[in-house]
Image: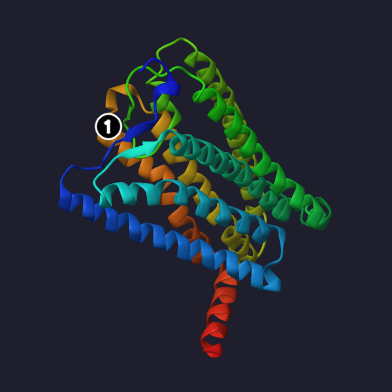
């Protein structure tokens, strides 16, 4: 294969070659996928239908649920189909689409998580300016900026990656199309251009991470100065779910991409990729609903209304 134009399809790495375990993988991923669809779908529906939840915090949470639904729908259904039909084939166009949408959705989600930390910072540290700094127009602009950032990032990475000449086969050691795995197939030094772009993206990610950390240092300092125990509990209840989501998203992604080569193996790479691409979209609704009484009350009201109509 002299270049990427001669590749019509890629081969994805299977979790197992045993038929029984392939079916187990299918049912396990199906359960996770349905849980993610149900959890994120309920959050989106509840926030959209309940007027009391039309606030900046829940507006950003609705956007997060939409991004989670999209990201898990890019990888899991294809992996399930491959296990069910005992194949690992994905077309060149399908692989490019996976890379584009994953970069788009993950980039937008990380930008949105950064914005959500700013929302919590203003709500707790500058409550008197909350309505001014986070009005409806400002929130829409911030959310649009997050989506646009993800789109631009995805466009650059996808165009750059699939313009590289690929001559080292078409087998990817991953259960979905991932840029580092595609770069391993490159046969020229032009892949350094994509590595440079990845480095710039990592610097931006690190900048956002520092912003989130600084925001939460200020938040916890402000919360600990709140005199009433009830006030501190309420403040923590709105911050801890977001902090847990950020920690889950960042820690799994960092371990996946920054782990030393000495402990790298195809099996470990598969497991770690599941942790950062599949687990967070399924866990986020549970994390947000566990400590958020306002969201739980609105959800219960919505479910009760649906049953009463029946």
Provide residue 201's location: percent of width, then percent of height: 57, 28
Q: Quadrant of residue 45?
A: bottom right
Q: Is residue 153 left or right of residue 96?
A: right
Q: Quadrant of residue 160?
A: top right
Q: Is residue 226 visible?
A: no
Name the quarter where the N terminus is drawn. top left
Residue 157 rendering spot, x and y as whole percentages: 55, 28
Q: Residue at x 29, y 28 (%)?
A: 264
Residue ID at (61%, 57%):
61
**Please, which residue is most extreme toward the right here?**
132
Colouring rule applied to residues: rainbow
The residue at 59%/39% (across/down) is: 213
Mark 1 closeness class: few <14, some 14–19, many ≥20 residues within 10 Å = few
**In the image: residue 154, left or right of residue 132:** left
- Residue 164, percent across and down? 48, 19
Residue, disc 1? 266
Which of these two is toward me, 290 or 222? 290
Image x and y of residue 206, in percent: 57, 30
Residue 288 visible in the picture: yes
Element type at marker 1? helix
Number of labels in the image equals 1
Q: Note whether 309 is above or below 132 in the view shown.
A: below
């Amino acid at each position: 294969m002299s270049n990427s134009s001669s590749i019509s399809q890629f081969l994805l790495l299977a979790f197992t070659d045993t038929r029984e375990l392939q079916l187990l993988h299918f049912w396990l991923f199906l359960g996770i996928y349905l849980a993610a669809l149900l959890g994120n779908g309920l959050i989106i529906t509840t926030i959209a239908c309940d007027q009391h939840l039309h606030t900046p915090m829940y507006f950003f949470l609705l956007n997060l649920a939409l991004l989670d639904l999209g990201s898990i729908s890019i990888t899991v259904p294809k992996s399930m189909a491959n296990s069910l039909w005992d194949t690992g084939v994905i077309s060149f166009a399908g692989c490019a689409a996976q890379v584009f949408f994953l970069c788009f959705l993950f980039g937008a989600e990380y930008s949105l998580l950064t914005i959500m930390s700013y929302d919590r910072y203003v709500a707790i540290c500058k409550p008197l300016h909350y309505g001014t700094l986070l009005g409806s127009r400002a929130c829409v602009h911030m959310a649009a900026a997050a989506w646009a950032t993800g789109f631009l990032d995805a466009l650059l990475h996808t165009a750059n990656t699939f313009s590289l000449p690929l001559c080292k086969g078409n087998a990817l050691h991953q259960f979905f199309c991932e840029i580092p795995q595609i770069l391993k197939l490159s046969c020229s030094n032009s892949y350094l251009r994509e590595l440079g772009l990845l480095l710039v993206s990592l610097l931006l990610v690190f900048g956002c991470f520092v912003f989130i950390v600084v925001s939460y240092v200020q938040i916890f300092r402000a919360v600990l100065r709140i005199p009433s125990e009830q006030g501190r509990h309420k403040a923590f209840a709105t911050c801890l779910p977001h902090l847990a989501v950020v920690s889950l998203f960042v820690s799994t992604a960092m371990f996946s991409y920054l782990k030393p080569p000495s402990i790298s193996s195809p099996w470990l790479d598969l497991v770690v990729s599941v942790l950062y691409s599949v687990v967070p979209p399924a866990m986020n609704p549970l994390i947000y609903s566990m400590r958020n009484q306002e969201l739980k009350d609105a959800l219960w009201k919505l479910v009760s209304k649906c049953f009463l109509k029946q």
